[in-house]
Image (cartoon, grey):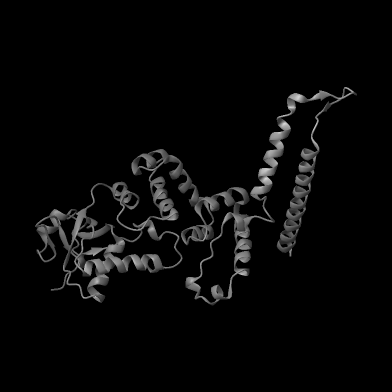
Amino acid sequence: MTITPLHDPKINNLKSLSNAVSTEEVSRPNGFAVAIELIEEEEGFNTRAAYCKGDYFQQPEVVEHINQLAAAYAAGEYVPPLIVKVKGGRVFLRDGACRWRAIHKAINELGALIKKVSVLEARGDDAEQSALIATTNNGLQISAMACAALYGRYVGWGWSAEEISVKLGKKLAHVKLHIELLELPLEMKYMVQANELSATLALELYREHGTDALQVLESARTKITGKATEEDKAKPQAEKTVRITKRHTQDGPRLTKKVVSQMHRSFVNITAKLNELSVAPSGDGFVLKLTADEVDELRKLQSKLKKDSESNESAHCDKQMSIDA
C-alpha cells in the first residue's frame, strides 16, 4: 500500500485526519500514531540550521546523535514522540528533526519494521509552535545563531524583547544579546554557528571594530593556522576546526597575572600612605615618603610596563603596515 500525504484544507488536526484516512496511516489506541511516510518537514520552520554553510544534519556531532537514536529505534527502546502539526491534511514536523531522520535510518539501514510512530499534536498558532524549538529539551542543545534566528522571527511578528523573554522563559539579557547577533556581518554569523567563534566575542569585536571585525578575525585565523602542527595540516578540511578566542584577537603580549598583581599591590601600598602626606617646603605640592623596597618595586614595574607598551606599539605598526600593503 502506497501512503501519500493528504491535501485537504478542512483537515487541521490529528482527530480529523484519523477520521479521513485508514488505520494503517493514523491510529489512536493509546495516543496518536502516524505512518512515517505522512510526516514531512516544513521548509524554514526549524531554525537549528540557520547560518550553517553546509548541511546541519551532516555535522559530525549531529550525525552521531542521529545514529544513536536510530539504534534505539531499531532496538525497540523508548524514544520521546515526535511533535507534529496538521495543516490542510498534511502532517508537519514541529519537534524531532533528528528523531525523524533516525526513524528513516532505522528502517532503511538497520532493518527496523516501523510502520507508524507515536506523535503529539502541537497546539496554538505559529508563535506557540515556534516556541517548541527553544523550550523542548529532547535533543541537541540549540546553538546561539539558531536562538537568534528564532527570536528574530518573533521580532518580525512585532514582539518586544520583554515579551519574547516571558513567552520562552528566557532571561531578558539573554534574549537581547541573541537579537543583537542578527546585526553581525553574515560571515561572522557563519563563524558563530560553526563554533569557530563564541557569540560573546563576536559581539565584543563588532561593537569595537564594526565591519572591520572581519579583518581582525582573518588576522587571528592566520595566527592560528600558521602555528598548526603537521598532524593538523594533514587532516581533511572537514575535520579542521579553527577556534578563535579573545587571546588570538589581541595585538602584542598581554599583562600577566603576576604583573597585574604587582600593580595592585603597589597601588594599595601607595594609597595606604595618603594620610602621611606632608606639604612640600616650597608649599607647592606634597611629599610622600616611600621605603627603598617600595621605590625598587615601582621602578621594576615601570620598566616592565614600558617594555610591554613598546612591544604593543611595534605589533600595532607591523599590523598597520600589513593592512596598508
* Residue 175: image location, x then y, percent: 43, 44
Relative to the observer, which residue lies in front, 48 or 238?
238
| Closest to the observer, 80 or 204 | 80
Extreme residue toward the right, this view = 282
Residue 145 falls in which quadrant of the image?
A: bottom left
Residue 170 x/y as whole percent: 38, 43
Indicate left or right for 137 with 228 as reference: left
- Horizontal side of 79 relative to 195 (left or right) equals left
Residue lying at 54% horizontally and 50% vertically, measured from the top left: 203
Q: Quadrant of residue 57?
A: bottom left
Q: Quarter of the image containing the C terminus?
A: bottom right
Which residue occupies 29% across, 50% down?
129
Residue 118: image location, x then y, percent: 18, 59
Quadrant the N terminus occupies: bottom left
261 w.r.t. 95: above or below: above
Above-or-below relation of 27 to 210: below
Q: Is residue 217 left or right of residue 65?
A: right
How many numbered dots are placed on residues in this image?
Answer: 0
x and y percent of residue 255 in the render?
67, 50
| Residue found 78% across the figure and 25% down from its top | 277
Residue drawn at x 46%, y 59% as measured from the top left: 193
Is 274 located above or below residue 224 in the figure? above
